[in-house]
Amino acid sequence: MNPALSRRDLVKGIAGAAAALAAGCQSEAPAPEDAVSEPPLKIVDPHVHVWVNDPKYPWPEENKNPPKEDATAETLLALMEAHGVSNTVIVHPMHYRWDCRYVGDVVKKYPKKFQGVCRVNPEAADAADELSKWTEEWGFKGVRLSPSPSAAGDWITKTELMDPIWSRAEQLKVPMLLLTKTSRLPDAQKYIEKYPDLDVVIDHMADCRPADPSEELDKLLTLAKFPRVYCKISHTWSISSEAYPYRDTWDQVKKVYDAFGPQRTMWGTDWPVSKPKIEYVKTLELVRDEMDFFNDDDKQWILSKTIERLWPFEA
């Protein structure tokens, strides 16, 4: 071998190897990591109603003006699918009075999507047994009482009527929902104190309006001292005197949030009762996107985790 050629070839070989190495390093350099996308926010709606015009589920005689338009479970499921709502708690509507069969059949048909809250006649002697029937035979996971602020709601002051219902709900471990005005909250508080192991949910902030005297809101906020009392920040569309996003209610929502904390605060659409005032999706966007005083962790609780503490759904 010619030593000169050998050295020249060696130099050329080294140079070529270096170039190849450089090119190879460039081609094999790892690409920048893709940004990790946040998992979608889980949404569980704790408050809707459903009904259907069907002879199988007749309207009671005392309902002289039943709804003409259906609000079926299938319509609700389509709305949920369209807007990312994974599960829903259906509250039995008063249109049927104390016959909870339609909601019961809906929950049985779609057990992974829905849970139900029943109603019982608070003035009936067998109300507690009716609660047991709807809970144990039909699978309801809650009961709702709606004491009117007028004399018609004075039944809530009668312990001989209330004790059996509240005691039975505590025994069955099903939440008690209260639809009422702030003037009735002191009456309810007596039973909250008496049955400390019962979860109680105040619906729609007791419909306290921003213009109401501060003493009325205080009747709601004082219930936050009871660790098993929850509050829904729904119905802003009803109590507001402004258009969407109802900013005149935000201060009140903040006070409820400050008192109860995110782990005992929940939203709710109240579909289809809310339809004349606000679209289904807007009730979600109001809390998720508009109320900017909630941080991401707050939203996880208010939009799902708080609700699932009371109503865990099947996987």
Image: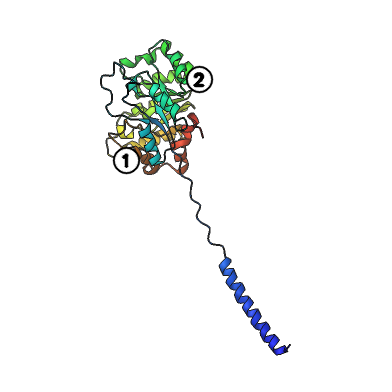
Q: Position of residue 143 (x, y in %)?
A: 43, 22
Quadrant hosting residue 61: top left
Q: Which mark is residue 245?
A: 1
Q: Residues within 10 Å of mark 2 (few under 14, many from 20)?
A: some
The reply to whether residue 25 is in sight is yes
The reply to whether residue 144 is in sight is no
| Residue beneath the point at 41% across and 22% down | 118
| Residue beneath the point at 64% across and 76% down | 17
Quadrant hosting residue 181: top left
Task: From the viewer's side, name the closer residue of 163 and 18.
Answer: 18
User: Would residue 185 be found to the left or right of residue 66 on screen?
Assistant: right
Quadrant hosting residue 253: top left
Q: Secondary structure at mark 1?
A: loop
| Residue beneath the point at 44% across and 19% down | 134
State the residue position of label 2.
Answer: 172
Q: Position of residue 103 (x, y in %)?
A: 40, 25
